[in-house]
Amino acid sequence: MKKILFLALFSVLLTSCISTKDLTYLQPNAITKSDSIKVAQEVSKPYRIQTNDILNINIKALDQKLVEMFSVSQTNGQIQTSPQTLFFNGYTVDDHGNIRVPILGEVNVLGFTTDEVRQKIEKQLLEEYFKKEANIFVTVKLAGLRYTINGEIGSPGTNVLYQDRATIMEAIANSGDIPITGNRKEVQIIRKFAHGFETYSIDLTNESAMNSPYFYIQPNDYIIIKPLKQKSWGTGVTGMQSVATIMTAISLITTLLVLSKTL
């Protein structure tokens, strides 16, 4: 009886404890030396604008009064570009892929990169409204990288990173990191495209994740962190927790056996 209980305890411990291999990000392959230097080539492609994106367009000239109407917001002559201002007063891409720009009217930006939109607006301004001597300077940026993350994460919900590019590692760190019960090997990403949604899983414990086109997040990405099996089993995530749970179960079983014999 003792031998059976010992084997049961040992087997459950092996399956219930979470290995450090399941918790460490971007682990090198076995053939890679720990002190070697590796260069990972970026595989991300320029983001192409989609509907519901918000653009921040800034136009400057030698005579700034000529282009004041293009500013997002002004207070006492100072341009206001806070995240809240960009949300309410930025250029939102409508369902037809257009934005409404003062003077220029509707400009189609669907499928363009931000740099292509910049060139398009700059060209139209110079051809129709300004001379080259005006020194028109146009910048076009996304008004932040908005993503939603749910599941086994420190702070689930929708967040915005106000930068041009960000990796999924940065998004996870910005959301409180994945707890010990989260599955880092099957992080699910749902991404919106013109033809619909695509779902992809990425293993963040393997350094090859950096070669994935999903390593860099895009606006409106939906990230799901699945729980490990140990959480649903309820046996604990560490050896001591598992032992305590199992010993409690064994004590209960033993008590029931003793009571059954006395009846």
Image: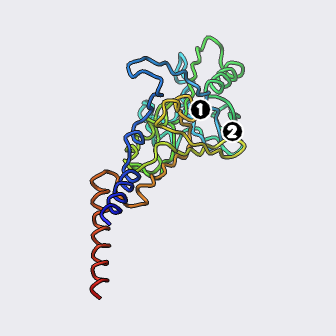
119 left or right, relative to 223: right
- Residue ID for mark 1: 213
Nearer the observer, 195 or 18: 18
Q: Is residue 30 visible?
A: yes
In this rendering, would 80 be left or right of 215? Answer: left
The quadrant of the picture occupied by the C terminus is: bottom left
- The residue pinned by badge 2 equals 98
**Residue situated in front as seen by the camera: 200 or 168:** 200
Q: Amino acid at mark 1?
A: Pro
Q: Is residue 39 above or below residue 212?
A: above
Residue 202 lies in quadrant = top right
Foreground residue among 24 and 132: 24
Who comes first in sequence, dot 2 or dot 1? Answer: 2
Q: Nearer the viewer, mark 2 or mark 1?
A: 1
x and y percentages locating residue 237 in the rendered image: 35, 52
The reply to whether residue 105 is in sight is no
In the rendered view, tell whether residue 44 sits above or below residue 224: above
Q: Point out residue 38 in the picture as x, y percentages from the top left corner.
A: 47, 19
Separation (CA) of disc 2 from disc 1: 27 Å
